[in-house]
Image (spheres, helix red, strand yellow):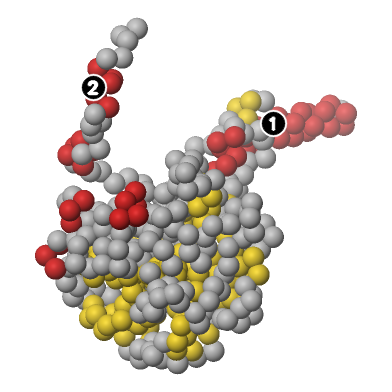
Amino acid sequence: MKQLVLSALVMAFTVSACTNTKTNHEQSGVVGENQVFPHKMPETKPDFPLSAAAERMFDYPAPRVQDNELFSQFKYTRLEGFDYNGGDGTISRRDPSRPIFVNGKYYIWYTKRQTKVPPIGWNRANEATEKIPSTDWDLCDLWYATSQDGFTWKEQGIAVARPEKPALGWRSVATPDILVWEGKYYLYFQAFNEPSGTRGDWCPISMAYADSPDGPWTHVGKPVVPFGKKGEWDQDQTQDPHLIVFKNKIYLYYKAAYNKWPDVRDKYAVAHGLAIADNPFGPFEKHPLNPVLNSGHETCYFPFKEGIAAMAIKDGNEAQTMQYAEDGVNFKIAATVELTPTACGFYTPDAFTGTDYGRGVTWGLCHFINAGTSADNKHSIIARVDCDLSLDVDEPWLKSTGVWHRPEVYFKQGLGNLKNKRLKMPKN
C-alpha cells in the first residue's frame, strides 16, 4: 500500500514539474526543444544561439534604440546676430568651436572669411592670390562671439589673426577648438602657409593662449601636433583639433586624409588620430594605435560615462554613427544616426573638469557649407543643433527613429546627367 502511495506521489510531482517547466519555457519563448526569440524584449542576451543581427543587439548600450543614450535625432535652428553681406559669398563663418560658459555668457570661436570675392575652388588654387581665396577656409582669421542664450550671438571681433608672411599660418588660420586648463585658455587650430588645394589641405595644428576668453591671444607660431613621418597615414596633415581632459591628461583628437597625393586625389580616405599631453604646449605624443576612428570628417568628441563618445559624420564605412570607447581609444559603434551636424562643437560643461563620469550633451553649434546658391556666392553659415545625447534629460521626441521629408527633398538628389546614361542601359 505504501509503495502504491509513494508511486502516485512521484508521478504527481513529475507531472507538476513538467507542467511548470513547460510554462516557464513558454514564457521565455521556448517551444519544445526549439528555442525562439521571445516577444518581450530581453534585457540581457538570451542563453541560446542567435543570428548575428540578434547578437549585435546586445552589443549596443541598449537593445532597443529608443533606450540608447547615444542615439538621437538632431534638430537645427538658424542663429540670430550674424550678418552674411546678403549672402553674396564674401563673408563666411564655419568650424565653430565647442561653446564654453564664462562669466554669465557663452563663448565660441570660429573660422571667418571676409574677402572681396567668393572662393574660386581648390582645383584653381594656382590662381589664388592674397586677395582671392581658393577655398572657403582660405584667407581666414579666427573670430569669436558671445551669447546669453545660445541662439542669439554678438560678434566680438578677431581673436587670432593671420600673422605676417612667412610666419606659420600667414595664409590662413582655421578650424579652432578651445581648451580650458588651470584657469587659462588655449585655442588650437589649423595653420596654412599655402592656398588650400595647392597640394591638398597640407597644414599642421598650431595654438594660441590667453588669460581670458576675450584675449589677447599669443600665437606660439609653430606646429603643436606635427605631421607623421613619410609613409605614415598622417604624413601630410594634422587637422580639426578637438580637446578633452581625460585621465588627468589632455586628449587631442585630430583628423587626416590619407591615401591621397597631389596628383591622385580621388582615392582618399579619412581617419582620426589621438595625441596626448600633460601640458597645453605639449609635447603631444601620438597614440600607437592611431588612427582610433576609421570614419568621419570633422572631429567631435565628448566625455560620456566612464569613457569618451564620438560622432562620425561623412566618409568611411562607419559614417553616420555614434561611437564609444571606455578607454578613449578603442571605439565601437553605439548607434547609427541620421542628419548629423557637420563640424559640430557640443556645449560640454564637463569637457575640461576631468570628470570620472561624463553626462553627455544636449546642444551645440555646427555649420552648413552650401549656404550659397551657386559657385558665384559660395559660403558657409553657423547654426545651432539640439539633441538628446545626455544622461540628464529625457526627450522622447528626439529618440524617434525616423525623419520624414517631403518628396521634393529627395527629388533634389536627382540623377542629373547620369539619367541619359541610365536611359541607354540595356533592357535585359
| Quarter location, residue 365 | bottom left
Q: x, y percentage for residue 338?
A: 37, 49
Amino acid of disc 1: Cys
| Label 2 secondary element | helix
Determine which of the numbered discs, if any, sits on residue 420 in the image: 2
Q: Is residue 389 left or right of residue 58?
A: left
Q: Is residue 152 visible?
A: yes
Q: Earlier in the sequence, mark 2 or mark 1?
A: 1
State the residue position of label 1: 18
Residue at x 32%, y 45% (from the top left corner): 402
Within 10 Å of disc 2 (Cα), the crowding (few <14, some 14-19, many 20+) is few
For marks 2 and 1, give the CA distance: 69 Å
Q: Is residue 396 left or right of residue 34?
A: left
Quadrant where the N terminus lies?
top right
- Residue extending furthest top? 428
Q: In this orientation, which residue lies closer to the viewer: 287 or 116? A: 116
| Label 1 secondary element | helix
